[in-house]
Structure formats: structure tokens, C-alpha cells
Amino acid sequence: MAKRGRKKRRAAIAFPHVPFERVLFYGIAFLVFTLPVFLWPSVSEYGYGKTVVALVGISLLAILWGLSAWQQGSWRIRLPWVTIPILGLVVASLLSLVAATNGRVVVQSLVVVLYFALLFLIVANAVRDRRDVDLLLAVLLISASLAALYGLLQYLGIMRGPTGRPGLESLISTMGNRNYVGGFLSYLLLPAVVLVVRPRPRWLRWLSILLIAFCFTIVLLVKQSGTVVSLLLSGAVLLVGCVIFRPVEPIRRGRVWLMILLGVLAVAFLVGSPSSPLNSVVGLSSEGQSVLAAWWERNAGRVRGWDWWVGWEMFLDRPWTGVGLGHYKLDFLEYKARFLATPRGEAYDFFIARAAQAHNEYVQVLAELGILGALALLSFVAVLAASLWKRLRANDETNRLDLLLFTCGIGVFLAHAFVSFPAHLPSSALVLVLLGGLIFSRTYGESAVIPIRLSGWRLKVSVAAVAVVGTVVSVVAVRDMKADVLMNEGIRHAHLGQFHTAESLFERSLELDFAPHQTYYHLAVVQIERGDFEQARTNLERCLTRFVDEAVYLNYANLLASLRQFDRAREAIDFLLSTHPQRQIAMRARYVQALLVAQTEDPREGIQLLEELVADEPAFETAYIGLGSLYEARGMTTNARKAYERALTIIERTLARAEAKLADTTTVTIEKYGQLRSEIEQLRQSRTTVLGRLAALPDPASP
């Protein structure tokens, strides 16, 4: 009786029958559709919100996968060969902690890498047949088309873009940058052809053709040479692949639809190509925009060259383990200064802003992970090529054409990675991961795959571990997103002059953020406004290992000078000037440098530096005020009066212009309002100071 009762109790608590395997697949489809079109305006950067969605979504998918295995009594995992070099990248990332200045940045970046690798495994194991392949491709194509449509509406001025005006610079869609949009769409174009050559209802084929052509038009419209060149190279690879593997039957069977697709793409080229006469007729380009695009391309090439050389300096300094995963943006200014000090760097005499990425994934891997990371990456490419060759040889003609098209999509990604950073963009990385997962799915056989099976206690421990890790990562990701929203809200209050509220929001943001960055800077700026200089100094010093920016060094040097720590202030300002900062930063840095020289070394040299500064920047009123002060201190009252009067003239003119802009409330954003409010307040204070000093000077008419 007791034994029968235990059996009944076990039956009563048996796992309910839920088709977790199919729930998992449709969960993948939902994530594939959602990620490209997801947009959360309250976060600081579009990709940040997408990354959080990806982390939470992949956590849920991993837990569903584990529940499916639990239901089946064993966990059968198919590990593609490329999993091994991916683990090599993980090891190289962990070793990069040796030189990292901020270990949390390495951990945060590594979690994202591991999660997208996990999504690759989930797709490779969850996709069962061609219907699954078609569904995921169709979902991604529809999502991409919606993102492209949003970008087009911004370009035409129907929907608001970042500039508030129609034009190319407003085309950012849900990606945050027109170049990101073009890259994302280009990786999908060739793989989506699978939806055209497969036997299916005519209306679905027509829809696929139209969506592919529309995405192709937007790729041309964004005028991004890197994506076009990558597409051409991958098209050449496709032709070579067709000659080698001869997928004749699917091409013959779908030849009519392929000809229709080529014809529609030809029309799309005439519409989207910048030099096309039809393009000018439909109004998607103009002669002026083409010139601007050409100018942008030339200068972007110079920027990329700069970024690559800075990455090379990082590699030379840390050749084996690199400077640390995710540290390119943290160490950029330091190595930029080193590069500018070299003979080659002397040719780069123009300003380029601090780069968060190297605009070349291979250079960035070399810089952040060193030789070990580069070897792991080369191993990944080699093993991927060998695996693709093996799977192509093992499949029939229809599957070979699919695999060739998927391979070309990956080829576009890898080629574009020479001039961009698609692996750092969630939507672009999703395309790579999805195509890789489809290639190594059961649909195309079991070659180049290592099967493993977990059962018993190993299954239970693994499922429990996945549930715990997934929950922890999701909680941390959501907290980080909340922290980012609070930071943005704090910035808004700071622009409005509500410093106490802003400070409270920044402090709450820091409590939630796993690896805070610019929040420390914004908090320090607010504390400077409130007169809490010591705490502001502490937070600016924290920025030096978290958010290394030109404005950080300028404020830090100013603050140190106010605290009479002149040696440290001089060190900070000299470093800032060695990085060739932008004009406004350089102008103020030279002013601080001149005052430091006058206070700690030779006042005459300080006067000379300020005279050189006002010669270069004749509208910089602060320099005239400082120059007047130095003249006055040396008894040169006539020169002091001229300097003060010149400063007052500039102040009055600038103040009137700023007040007029502030009065036009229809065109002033909160950020612009904050900048104008701060500028007006500073100008009024400067005017009061100048008037007081002029009144204190001896009357020039008196004997």
C-alpha cells in the first residue's frame, strides 16, 4: 500500500506535457523578429536596449531548452566544430584580464559574446527541417523590411529623425546609425534568396522578391561603400561556389523566379543608386548629397586609418594578451597620444573623436586580445571554412544552394568587418548567429558536428545551472537598463538646472549598474555645479578607468587647478593636448595651460601663451579675461583695459545670440536648452566680472 501511494504521488507531480521543443523554436522566431525592430528611446544608445533584450531573451530560450531536455529525459546537444575555436576566444578573453584596467568591462563583454554563442547553439539544435529554416528566414526578412521602411520614412521626413529634417543623416531607423542599417540589411540579402528558389505559393515568392528588392534599395540609399563592396565580393564567391558544387537542379527549377528577382533588383538599383538618372527623378538623391557622400567617404577612410593605427599601438604594447576585452574605447586616448608622437602619427593633423570601436573587427581583436585572440579568430575562420566544405560535400544539390547562400551572407559580414564593427551590433550579430545556426542544423545533416548526451544527475545539474545563470544574467541586464534610464533622466534634470534631483538620479543609477561608465562623469559635473569639489574630483578619477573622454580630462584639470594641485593639473592638461582634441576642448585646454604656466612658472610665458590663443581664437572671451588679469597683475593697465573691453564686446554679442536661441522654444530640445542655459549663466557671470574689473582699473583720463 505504501509503495502504491508513493507511485500515485510521483504520478501526481509528473511534469505536465508541454511541447517545449516547439515552444523553444517559436521563441527563437519571436526573438529574431523582435531584436531588429526593438526600440527603447529612454536608453542612451539603441544597441544597448537591444543587447538587454537579447540577454533576457536568450536566457529564456536556454531555460526552455533545458526544460525540453528534462521532459525527454536526456539532453542531446549537437556541438558544431566551430564551438572549439569559440572556446579559444573565451580563454583569450579571460587571459586579457591580465592587462585590463577594468575587470568588470571584460566580464560584461564576455557575457555578451557567450550569450550570442549560446544562441548559435540553440538555433543549431532547435531547427529540424526546411520549414523551420524558411520560417526563421521569413521572420528576419519581414523584421528587416520594417526597420528599412522606418529608415526610409525618416529619410523622406514623414517620420522624425535625429536631425528633425529629411535627409540622409536622419536615416537611423531602429539601429541608431545609417551605416548600421545598411550593414544589417546587406548581410541578409543573399541568404533571403532561399525564400525565392524554394517551391512554395506564388504570392510568397513575390512577397520575398519585393522585400529583398526593398532592402537592397535601402542598402544603396545609405551610400555605404563597405557594404556594397562586401556584397560584390560575396556575389563572386557565390559564382565560384556554384561552379565547384554545381547546384544545378534548384537553379534550373527556380530559374524563372531568379530572373524575375534579378530584374526587380535591376530596377531597385536604378532607384537607389546615387548616380542613377531614375534616382534623381524619384527624388531619393541630389547632386549635393552625392558630393557630400563622396566627401564623407574620403574622410571616413582617414578616420578608419587613424583608428587602426591606434589599435596597432595597443597591440605593440600588449602583444600576447591585449589591453583587455572591451577596452579599446577605454584606452583609446592614451594610445592615440602615443601614435601621434610617432613619425607616422604626425601626418594625422586633424581631429577625430574618441572611438568606441576600431572600425575593423580584426584589428580590434588584435588590440584587445593580442596574439592569442588573433590565433583563436583565425582558427574560427579556418574551422568554419572546413566545416562548410564538409557539409556542402555531404548534401544534395538543393541543400547545397541553401548552404552557399548562407555562406555568402556570412561572407558579407566577414568582409564588412574589415571596415566596420558588425560583431558589436546586436542586430548584425543576430544575422551571423542565425545563419551559422541554420547551416549547422539537422536540416543539413550531421557532418562537422560533435554529439554529446547528458542524462541522470548531469542533466539535472546542467538544467539547474542554466536556470540559475539565466536568471542572474537577466536580472543584472534589466538592472543595467534601469540604471541607463535613470542616468538619462538625470542628464535631463541637469540640463534643466535641477542639480539636486540629477545627483540623486545618478547615485541611484550607480547602485544598479554592474559596470558604470559615463554616469560618474555626469555626477561629477553636477557636483562641480553644486560646489562639492572633492567628491567631484573622486568621481572624475573613477572615470579614468571607466569613461575616458576629452571632457573628463578638461574638467579634471580645471578642478585640480581650483584645488591648487597644480602639478597634477598640468599633467592632465598636457596629456589632453597631446591627443589633438577637438577645437572647443583644445581652446579651453590651452587657456588652462596658460594660467597654470603663469601661476607656477613664468607669468610672462603665460601671457605669451594667451596672446597666441586669442590670435588663433579671436572670439574666445574667457582668454581675454585671463589675459586682462595677467596684464593687470603686472601693472599693464592699458593692455588690461583693452583686453577686458574686447571680452565685454564678445560677451554682449554672444549673450544676445544665445538668448535669442533660447527664446525660440519651438526648435530647442531639452539638451540644447540645458546647453544654452548653462552658456547664458556663464556669460552673465563673466559680464559681471569684467564690468567689476573695468570699474576697478584707474581712470585712463586721470594723471
Image (spheres, grey):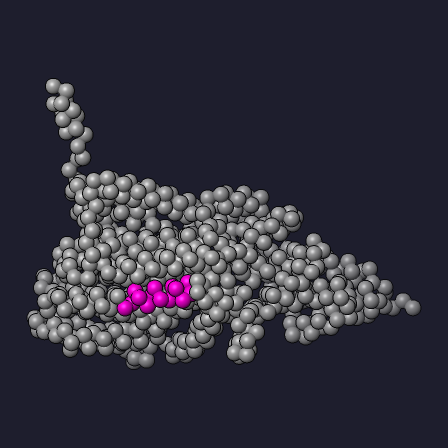
User: Which of the pair 221/47 is nearer the observer?
Assistant: 47
Residue 124 image-quadrant placement: bottom left
Residue 423 image-quadrant placement: bottom left
Residue 210 makes an appearance in the image? no
Q: Position of residue 299 (x, y in %)?
A: 45, 76
Q: Position of residue 437 (x, y in %)?
A: 23, 58
User: Which of the pair 361/553 is nearer the observer?
Assistant: 361
Q: Is residue 365 magenta?
A: no
Q: Is residue 375 magenta?
A: yes
Identify the residue at image location x=19%, y=77%.
239
Q: Is residue 128 left or right of residue 558?
A: left
Q: Is residue 567 left or right of residue 151?
A: right
Residue 112 makes an appearance in the image? yes
Q: Is residue 448 left or right of residue 660?
A: left
Identify the residue at image location x=61%, y=68%.
577
Q: Position of residue 431 (x, y in %)?
A: 27, 61
Identify the residue at image location x=27%, y=41%.
461
In the displayed image of the protein, which residue is found farthest to the right?
A: 703
Residue range highlighted in magenta: 369-382
* Quadrant of the frame with the C terminus: bottom right
User: Which of the pair 216/274 is nearer the observer?
Assistant: 216
